[in-house]
Image (cartoon, helix red, strand yellow):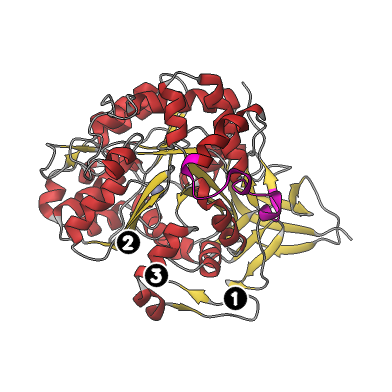
């Protein structure tokens, strides 16, 4: 018998299909949304409830070696926040970097049903896939770190464009990645080999490779376009975290011309002021550029006060922050692929820079004219936990709440922002865009982020409440692939989502060019590197988007 469900009389927010709070039914059959179901279908009475597609997190860090190291660094978190098993779900630990099981369940308790890890070294793909397989409820994928890959930088330097394209396709295939991630492109080699230094300018050529970050970014945008990747290069810009870095961010966006690019956690790259001095806000300059350029998308990377964990492939950045915290940190060089730095962190209301960062993120949200391209993230766990999303939604929807929160933070920082002048309050439809429809569109996920016929039946049903933090903190129902995982606020079944990947076709001749590089430099043999399909478990191939 078909698995049928009718969600009846809910107030539906489905911006991709221009539905803005209409009372209607949503019908589900065999895990997908359909036009209608039979009279024998199960029924959820959603009268008085808000119905939205399941949330889609476009940028977080939830699996792999860096996440494990961060867990090990903070055992106190595990003691303070145990995640008990229930009749239907497994146990775990919480805190700022939850265990695999807790990560999936906690995303579900916010109504999120899809999440992408934003920085995976291809060398760690097996580990990541094993952890994601243990991350329940949500569908998941990951971006692979290619912006500091030595083999690829050599191809770029020599202008071997066709081989670059084939090599990127091979790496995506070998690691089951979704798109390419560039983190502080060109910055790792100076850090690894040259006395902890960094590239300081988008046009600065590294000594060894004689190419600039701009050339690397430009090359990857071309490759992504030619391959038709469902999501463009996901770029963590150079100079992240430094005062005055907004000019680098604008130059990065200009490099794209009219080609698509996604700028990650853009708040961290929206600072005016002089290098080495207190930052000032350049939120307005950044948003104005994005508003005028429809080829650009970004996630905000909002800072939320409280505990966080810096977890980045930008090793020089973690080194700088470790100098600030004087606490535990980890640095890892991942062979010829990436750097990595991890440092527990705490964003505090009374500290000027932290308060300013908080305000800049909100400025960017509130000045954005196109919520489809400026989407919600905290760069979990860098700017704060994904568990703070309901509070962030309340900050965006409730001007009075925002004003009260502004009174609690560093007032010198508030005097340097124009946040207090911004009266905008996000609507429920706009929240549905920045948390669901927008990220799904940026990712090229045609079956997610909406409730039209054919979409995955990933649906969240909230009790409509005045306090939006309470509302988004505890959905009444979460439906994943047609299964009611949460019913009346409680888990009623366990469920394991699938891996989303964009594995590429490539010319096998490229293997003969890559193989000798492995023999010379890698700790793993070429033939053992590529991840077999068995590691994917349940998975979905997201097709290329040829223009
Ligand atoms: Zn990130």
Q: State how many labels appear.
A: 3
Neighbour tally class for label 1: few under 14, some 14-19, many 20 plus, Cα within 10 Å:
some
Q: Which residues are magenta?
A: 520-539
Depth check, mark 1 against mark 3: the one in front is: 3
Image position of 194 (left or right of 70): left
Q: Which of the two discs, 2 and 1, labels the residue nearer the N terminus?
A: 1
Residue position marked by numbered label 3 in the rendering? 72
Residue position marked by numbered label 2 in the rendering? 308
Residue 481 on image: x %, y %: 70, 56
How far is mark 1 from mark 3, CA to CA? 20 Å
Which of 482/134 is in front?
134
Image position of 235 (left or right of 445): left
Residue 73 on image: x %, y %: 35, 69
Q: Is residue 338 above or below residue 534?
A: above
Label 2: state its secondary structure: strand
Residue 522 sits inside the magenta stretch: yes
Q: Is residue 105 above or below residue 270?
A: below
Residue 192 on image: x %, y %: 30, 44
Task: Tell me, yes or no, if residue 456 can be seen here.
Answer: no
The residue lying at 18 percent from left, 40 percent from top is 243
Label 1: state its secondary structure: loop
Determine which quarter of the picture holds residue 288: top left
Which of 258/36 is in front?
258
Depth check, mark 2 against mark 3: the one in front is: 3
Neighbour tally class for label 3: few under 14, some 14-19, many 20 plus, Cα within 10 Å:
few
Q: Which mark is residue 90?
A: 1
The residue lying at 75 percent from left, 63 percent from top is 43
The residue lying at 21 percent from left, 44 percent from top is 195
Determine which quarter of the picture holds residue 374: top left
Quarter of the image for the N terminus: give it.
Answer: bottom right
């Amino acid at each position: 018998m078909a698995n049928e469900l009718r969600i009846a009389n809910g107030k539906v927010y489905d911006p991709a299909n221009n539905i803005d709070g209409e009372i209607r039914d949503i019908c589900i059959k065999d895990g997908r949304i359909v036009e209608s179901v039979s009279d024998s279908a199960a029924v959820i009475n959603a009268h008085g409830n808000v119905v939205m597609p399941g949330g889609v997190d476009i940028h977080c860090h939830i699996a792999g070696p860096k996440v494990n190291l961060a867990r090990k660094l903070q055992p106190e978190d595990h003691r303070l926040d145990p995640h008990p098993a229930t009749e239907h779900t497994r146990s775990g630990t919480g805190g700022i970097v939850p265990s695999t099981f807790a990560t999936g369940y906690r995303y579900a308790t916010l109504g999120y049903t899809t999440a992408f890890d934003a920085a995976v070294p291809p060398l760690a793909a097996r580990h990541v896939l094993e952890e994601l397989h243990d991350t329940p409820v949500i569908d998941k994928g990951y971006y692979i770190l290619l912006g500091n890959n030595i083999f690829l930088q050599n191809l770029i330097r020599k202008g071997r464009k066709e081989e670059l394209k084939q090599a990127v396709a091979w790496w995506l295939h070998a690691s089951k990645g979704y798109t390419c991630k560039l983190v502080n492109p060109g910055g790792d080699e100076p850090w690894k080999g040259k006395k902890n230094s960094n590239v300081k300018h988008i046009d600065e050529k590294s000594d060894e490779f004689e190419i600039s970050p701009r050339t690397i970014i430009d090359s990857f945008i071309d490759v992504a376009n030619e391959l038709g990747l469902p999501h463009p290069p996901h770029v963590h810009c150079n100079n992240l975290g430094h005062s005055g870095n907004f000019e680098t961010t604008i130059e990065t966006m200009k490099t794209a011309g009219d080609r698509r690019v996604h700028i990650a956690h853009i708040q961290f790259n929206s600072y005016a002021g002089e290098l080495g001095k207190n930052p000032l806000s350049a939120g307005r300059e950044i948003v104005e550029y994005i508003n005028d350029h429809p080829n650009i998308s970004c996630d905000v990377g909002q800072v939320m006060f409280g505990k966080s964990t810096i977890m980045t492939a930008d090793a020089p950045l973690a080194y700088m922050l470790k100098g600030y915290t004087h606490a535990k940190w980890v640095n890892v060089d991942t062979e010829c692929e990436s750097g990595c730095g991890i440092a527990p962190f705490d964003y505090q209301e009374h500290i000027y820079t932290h308060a300013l960062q908080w305000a800049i993120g909100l400025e960017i949200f509130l000045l954005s004219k196109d919520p489809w391209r400026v989407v919600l993230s905290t760069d979990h766990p860098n700017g704060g936990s994904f568990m703070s999303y309901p509070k962030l939604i309340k900050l965006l929807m409730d001007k009075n709440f925002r004003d009260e929160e502004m009174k609690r933070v560093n007032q010198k920082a508030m005097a340097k922002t124009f946040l207090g002048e911004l009266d905008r309050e996000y609507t429920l439809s706009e929240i549905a865009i920045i948390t669901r429809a927008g990220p799904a569109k940026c990712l090229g996920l045609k079956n997610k982020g909406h409730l039209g016929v054919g979409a995955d039946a990933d649906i969240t049903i909230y009790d409509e409440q005045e306090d939006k933090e309470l509302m988004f903190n505890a959905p009444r129902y979460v439906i994943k692939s047609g299964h009611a995982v949460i019913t009346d606020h409680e888990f009623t079944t366990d469920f394991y989502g699938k891996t989303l990947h964009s594995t590429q076709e490539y010319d096998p001749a490229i293997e003969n060019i890559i193989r000798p590089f492995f023999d010379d430099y890698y700790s793993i043999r070429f033939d053992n590197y590529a991840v077999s399909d068995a590691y994917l478990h349940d998975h979905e191939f997201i097709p290329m988007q040829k223009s």
